[in-house]
């Protein structure tokens, strides 16, 4: 597989509305020889994903703006702009976005593959903004997660 250099601008990349968030893929398996995925996320204030564990990937976050409280394997990590968070493969984790502003972060997973989950569980974003609130189909999310090596373990924590 031949990989060429490229540059993406701030609004470039495949974008999905995924669990009420905006997820813009900057690099995925086809760009990195399946080594990693890089996605820019915008999460609304108070957002929290279900408690889950990745069976294949380490997951990392580099916070650009906003705050979040990460919970992983009994540890609580409070992060803000410029902070980096590592959530190792196989450990149950979640996070809660602070109440005052959206969280904007780079999410990095290694090896690649998270982009397939985002595409399957999300919908192409017609606009580069947070989606309007909408219900999430837990059965569809669970099936997409299972097909992509993510185990859902419980509900999101309370904000």
Image (cartoon, rainbow, N blue to C red):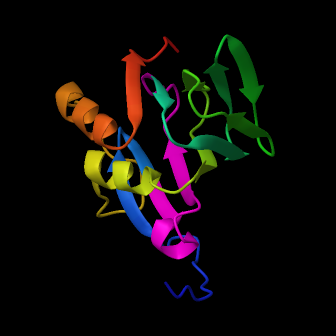
Say if the magenta span includes residue 75: no
**In the foreground, 75 or 129:** 75
Return the residue nearer the eye: 28 or 23. Answer: 28
- Looking at the rendering, the stretch of residues picked out in magenta corresponds to 23-51
**Among all residues in the image, which is located at the extreme right?**
82
Q: Position of residue 73 (x, y in %)?
A: 64, 16
Residue beneath the point at 63% across and 19% down: 71
Q: Is residue 8 placed above or below 47 in the rendered structure?
A: below
The picture quadrant where one finds residue 100 is top right
Quarter location, residue 68: top right
Q: Residue at position x 61%, y 41% from top?
A: 58
Q: Is residue 134 left or right of residue 79?
A: left
- Above or below 82: residue 97: above
Can the viewer see residue 134 in this picture?
A: no
Q: Position of residue 48 (x, y in %)?
A: 48, 25
Residue drawn at the location 48% of the way across and 66% of the way down: 29
In the image, 64 versus 117, the foreground residue is 117
Asked if one can make out residue 149 in the rendered structure from this viewpoint, the answer is yes
């Amino acid at each position: 597989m031949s990989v060429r250099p490229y540059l993406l601008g701030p609004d470039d990349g495949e974008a999905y509305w995924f669990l009420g968030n905006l997820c813009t893929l900057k690099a995925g398996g086809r760009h990195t020889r399946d080594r990693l995925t890089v996605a820019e996320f915008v999460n609304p204030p108070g957002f929290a994903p279900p408690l889950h564990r990745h069976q294949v990937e380490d997951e990392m976050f580099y916070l650009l703006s906003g705050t979040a409280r990460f919970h992983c394997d009994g540890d609580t990590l409070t992060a803000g702009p410029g902070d980096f968070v590592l959530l190792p493969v196989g450990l149950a984790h979640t996070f809660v976005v602070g109440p005052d502003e959206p969280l904007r972060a780079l999410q990095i997973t290694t090896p690649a593959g998270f982009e397939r989950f985002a595409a399957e569980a999300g919908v192409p974003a017609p606009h580069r903004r947070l989606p309007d609130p909408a219900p999430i189909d837990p059965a569809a999310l669970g099936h997409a997660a299972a097909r992509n090596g993510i185990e859902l373990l419980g509900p999101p924590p309370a904000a």
